Amino acid sequence: MLLPTRCPLCTRPGPAPCAPCATRLPPARASPYPAVLAYAGEARRLIHALKYRNGRAVAGSLGMAMADLVGPGAVDVVTWAPTAPRRRRARGYDQAEVLARAVGRQLGVPVRSLLRRTDRAGPQTGRRRAERLALAPAFVTVGRVAGRVLVVDDVVTTGATLHAASTALLAGGARTVLAVAAAATPRPRSYTREAATEKEQAWTSR
C-alpha cells in the first residue's frame, strides 16, 4: 500500500516540502560548490528527514532545484559522493544517490555509480572543521569515466568530500567535473536579503 506524501516539516499532505514551508527555507550563498539551501533551521530539518527518517520524497523538489543550478546541457552523466558503507547499510539507501537520481531525471542524463570510498575515516557528520579536513573521505573510480561529470552530495561543509570526489573523477578520466549539493553549512552573513528573496520566489514558483 502506498502512503500519501506529506511535508516532512509540517506533516501537511501533499508536496514535500509544501509551499508554505518552502518559503521558510534559507537559501545557500554562492560558493565554489553551489548548493540550494543553507544547512540551518527548517532546511536542516528537511535534510535530516531525507538522511535519517527515510524522507526520500523531498528528493524530487531538491533535485529540481539542484538541476536548475547546473543548467541544461552542462554535463553528460551524474554520479554521487557515496556515504560511509556503515551508514548506507543502516539506512538501507544512500541519500546522495537518491538526490543524484532526482537530478539526473531533471537534466535528462544518465546516472551512474562512478565512485567507491576507500577511506576508513567514517562519516563526516558531527566533526569539527579541522577534523573534516584532516580526515577527508578518499575515493577511487569504478568502471569507465569520461566526458563531463556532475557529482552530487547532500551537505557541503568544508568542501573536502566534493573536492576528493572531483579529484578522483578527473584522475579516472573525466574531462570536466561539476559539483552540486542540496545544502551548505552557512557562514556568517551567508546570504543577503536580496538573494534570500530571489531564491524563496524560485522555490514557491515550483
Image (spheres, rainbow, N blue to C red):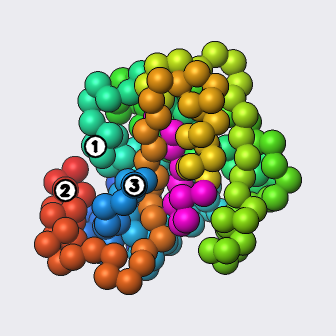
The label nearer to you, 3 versus 1, is 3
Vertical order, 170 against 138 (above or below): above
The label nearer to you, 1 versus 2, is 1
Percent of width and height locating residue 108: 36, 24
Q: Give the overall secondary structure of the magenta segment.
A: strand
Q: Is residue 123 left or right of residue 19?
A: right
Q: Are marks 1 and 2 in contact (CB under 8 Å)?
A: yes
Disc 2 from disc 3: Cα separation? 21 Å
Give yes or no for residue 44 being in the magenta stretch: no
Which residue sits at x=32%, y=66%?
Answer: 29
Range shown magenta = 150-160
Read off the residue under disc 1: 68
Query: Foreground: 16 or 87?
Result: 87
Q: Who comes first in sequence, dot 3 or dot 1?
A: 3
Residue that extends furthest to the right in the rendered view of this protein: 120
Query: Foreground: 81 or 53?
Result: 81
Asked which quadrant contains residue 79, the reply is top right
The label nearer to you, 2 versus 3, is 3
Read off the residue under disc 3: 32
